Image (cartoon, helix red, strand yellow):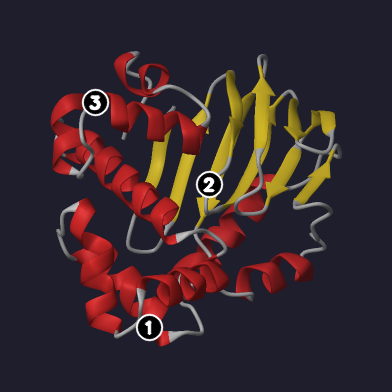
Amino acid sequence: MKVLDFNIKRGIFHFEMNPFNATKHAHPLVEILYAINGTFSVETDLERKDNVTLAVIDANVNHLVISEECQTELLMVESHSTELEVFLSEKGITFSNGVYITKETCRNADLIDAIKKRSYERNLKHTNDQRVQNCLKIIESEDVPYDQLITHLTSKVFLSPSRLSHLFKENTGVSLKKYLVWARLKKAIHFLLNDQTSFTAAAYQSGFYDQSHLSNAFKRFLGVPPSEAYNSRTLQS
């Protein structure tokens, strides 16, 4: 896995991957995957599609990808508004059961570039609720212990834990607790890429209890164990 861009602030994560298999997973990002050469397969809880050249998968959709003889490019974008959905619709991409798939050979690389450009031009992570937006900012910018974070957030936005949890999921599509784990996973990968730290050190630095806790989160959100991306030295900046 070669990292082309890993921007936590903008919520833009861009990779190039050689043949790989990902088990069922879901993450709070829109995923755009296209075949540089060959084709791949995508399976959700509802269907499986083979000989795919381009797949756009909505956030929080459970899916797996099989690309045993295919080089692929992957763009993952955090979007908490309808702007990305509208932009995709303008490109002729609409979701069916959370997925858009084509088997046609077209200018998919141009689509990746266009989506990435729009993501940098606009703040797609912006939500309509300022309280939720403040929480997202705190999660990214403040180093608060995991077991204290929800209490810290509720004190900042003057909401009860249950009300905050409801608003957060309503505006982001994912539960607050799940997003907190995702935020720590992003930080851990950032440490691995930029600080050349060990996997164990990255786990503690990013707020995981231990290496196993980080490994489980890695596979749950990305569909592959960290050994395939890190220990094999395929995770490159």
Q: Earlier in the sequence, mark 3 or mark 1?
A: 1
Q: Earlier in the sequence, mark 3 or mark 2?
A: 2
Q: Residue 193, percent across and down? A: 25, 36
Q: Secondary structure at mark 1?
A: helix
Q: Residue 210, percent across and down? A: 20, 29
Q: How many marks?
A: 3
**Res 131 label:** 1
Q: Residue 25, percent across and down? A: 58, 35
Amino acid type at circle 2 is: His
Please say if 149 is above or below 72: below
Q: Quadrant of residue 217?
A: top left
Q: Residue at x 30, y 16 (%)?
A: 231
Category of crowding for the residue at label 1, using alpha-carbon neighbours closer than 10 angstroms: few (below 14), some (14–19), many (at least 20) = some
Amino acid type at circle 1 is: Arg
Q: Is residue 100 left or right of residue 34?
A: right
Q: Which residue is mark 2?
A: 27
Q: Is residue 150 left or right of residue 207?
A: right
Instruction: Give the Cα distance between marks 3 and 1.
Output: 33 Å
Q: Quadrant of residue 200?
A: top left
Q: Secondary structure at mark 3?
A: helix
Q: Which residue is mark 3?
A: 211
